[in-house]
Amino acid sequence: TQFFNEPATTEIYTTSQSSAASDVYKRQVMSWRVRFNDGSERFFEVGTGEEVTPVIQILEFNNVIFECSLPDTFKGVDEVVYGSSRFTQEQLDSMQVFTDGQVTIDSYGLINYIRTSFENSTRYTLTNEIMAELAAGFIENLGLNPANYVLDSLETVSDGSHKTRYIYSDADGNLLFENFIEIHLSDLGIVFASFRVDEYSKGIRSDDFVSLSAVLLEHLDINSDNVFVITNIDSGYIRETIISENAIACWRVIYDDGNVQYFSVVTGEELIVD
């Protein structure tokens, strides 16, 4: 048997008598980690000797399967506040010239681009690499830095074309879910795009955020026979409605059945978004 003095970390623990997230959201304890020769580990709170259990172990024991890492800490601010679109009408007019397309913007700041000329078009074999190159070129032509946008989804539609969605990632690695660029590609290249790129300001930076593992323990029905397979987790900011100026700091949790949930990193509540 080996003993380790484990300092309080971002890992969250709960006692065997409690599994409610409200009890463990912000509880971090100094613990002893006892590692046995068979590779198993147990944790005991310093001072009381009470055995504690990392919440992640409770989730995994109750049919919650993680196909991704569990980022239990959030680095960022409590919210971002959106302003007007980054693009002026003059910029949109010039965009129509260099893209050979028609550009419109709606009252919510969503910009739509439709390519209108395919004369002398190059035909492409749309590999992932080619699509990434075409998308990066389009983003750069908008006057944006492609390195600030991460591929969020890639979908093949019924006519054999592809739809890719890129989301802006800030300096902390958090996604601004409403600052996105969606690009539709065929073997003729980019045929349609819709994007929203709004100016924004950041709120208050804090370390007082809840643990995602405790949030999942609260919201998933782990006492049922259901198996929850989580394929991806992202941190970012989401508006609750399309007209909201404020976007709340959140975790986005994606399941293997396509279901998506957003949870506030401040309160742990599930966010119902439009």
Image: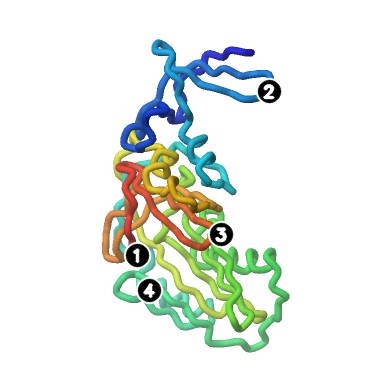
Q: How far apart are marks 2 and 1 (CA)?
A: 58 Å
Q: Can you tell which mark lies on residue 151?
A: 3
Q: How far apart are marks 4 and 1 (CA)?
A: 13 Å
Say which quadrant the C terminus sits in.
bottom left
Indicate which disc, 3 or 4, sits on the residue closer to the N terminus: 4
Q: SS of the residue at dot 3?
A: strand
**With respect to residue 129, does 114 lie above or below?**
below
| Residue 180 quadrant | bottom left
Of the residues shown, which amino acid type is indicated by label 1? Ser
Q: Is residue 20 left or right of residue 132?
A: left
Label 3 or label 4, whichever lies nearer to me, is: 3
Q: SS of the residue at dot 2?
A: loop
Q: SS of the residue at dot 1?
A: strand
**Residue pointed to by mark 2:** 38
**Residue pointed to by mark 1:** 85
Indicate which disc, 2 or 3, sits on the residue closer to the N terminus: 2
Residue depicted at x 52% and y 52%? 227
Q: How crowded is mark 1: few (under 14 residues within 10 Å), some or many (20 or more)?
A: some
Is the Cβ of the residue at disc 3 closer than 8 Å to that at disc 1? no
